[in-house]
Amino acid sequence: MRTQRVAKTPNLPQTRSELQNWIHQNLRLASGEESTLLEAFDAVFTRHERLWQESKHEAIQALSAGFAEKMARVTTELQAKDATTSSISTYFEQLVADLTDKSYRDPKTKLMNFARFTDQLESFLALEQRGRWCAVGLVDITQFKWYNDQLGHAVGDRIILRVAQLLREQVRSEDLLAQERPQRQVRELHARFGGDEFCFLIPDLAEDQMAYAIGERFREAVARYDWSIEDPRLAAKPVGVDVGVVCLKLGAVSERRIMARQIADALIRRADELMYEAKGQAADHIHFMRARLIDGNLVDDSVQ
């Protein structure tokens, strides 16, 4: 792999001090340019260290976003220099790639894996201060075992991939964030829970019924899709999904920060229960619950 070859090159810097010496000895920049470059690297390292102390999850996000942005600027500014400059960019770009694509993605669907989704949800609950409602949903492909057993695993894989694509298309973060916060970075909201199950987060809702409407849009998209495109035999038995959604009134961040992990687990567990209730009743609609927090506990608030 490219990352392994770069790591074995003896002249690449491994520490901040070595990086400063390397720039001084190899790039031969003017004093002012060298100081500017070093200040840019120092700013990245300082910010990275501070964020790791505040939150391991936010630090990883800062590393992925901050390093990529900084190194893109460095590459642009120094691309006219000799070829050794590009090794710095390659070194950090490969580090970012390792922390994202390889560590956090389900290899089949390319969605986030469940561990990463849980970390993202915990971070959101601990840090989000401006939201009103958020929602967590669990999705299961109806009678997926039948498709696997009767039509084969290849068809089962195509069904999983298509449901993942429909989930990405119908539960979209830009629907919710673009109007009020045009400059805010869009979160990735979808993950593969495991097997034929998926999960999603809908942040910053103005009202709880928006979560139901978005989830229903996804469920209907699966029901309307021409499944014979994936396999002609699916025309006789189209694919459907069972969906459970919990919509949480966020309240003050101070009430969530300390117990963010427990709240995240409770939201996922309750959405999973709702999904299986829908499955047990052969429901053609979403099972939905509105909730709020009381002393850190998730309480059903559906009855006003």
Image (cartoon, helix red, strand yellow):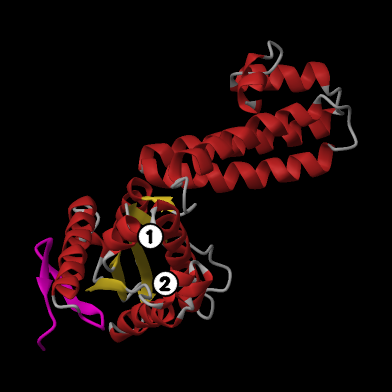
- Give 214 or 47, whichever is nearer the viewer: 214
Q: Are marks 2 and 1 in contact (CB under 8 Å)?
A: yes
Which of the 4 image quadrants contains residue 216?
A: bottom left
In the rendered image, residue 293, in percent from the top left (x then y), is placed at 14, 68
Q: Amino acid at mark 1?
A: Leu
Q: Which mark is residue 234?
A: 2
Left/right placement of residue 9 relative to residue 267 reads: right
Check the image and report above or below for 101 versus 23. Answer: below
> What is the count of numbered marks?
2
Quadrant of residue 82 in the image? top right
Asked whether, in this view, residue 193 is left or right of residue 226, the answer is: left
| Among numbered discs 2 and 1, the one appearing first in the sequence | 1
Picture quarter with the C terminus? bottom left
The image position of residue 235, as x and y in percent, is: 43, 77
Is residue 197 shown to the viewer in this render? no
Residue 112 vertical placement versus 179 (above, below): above
Q: Where does residue 72 sit, x and y in percent of width and height?
A: 72, 45
31 to 252, vertically: above or below:
above
Q: Is residue 170 visible?
A: yes
Closer to the camera, 273 or 188? 273
Tell me the crowding category of disc 2: few under 14, some 14 to 19, or many 20 or more residues within 10 angstroms, Cα based: some
Magenta span includes 85: no
Which image quadrant: the N terminus? top right
- Rendered location of residue 127, percent (x, y): 34, 58
| Residues at marks 2 and 1, CA–CA distance in whole angstroms | 9 Å
Magenta stretch: give its range.
283-304
- Reading the image, the residue beneath label 1 is 151
Q: Amino acid at mark 2?
A: Leu
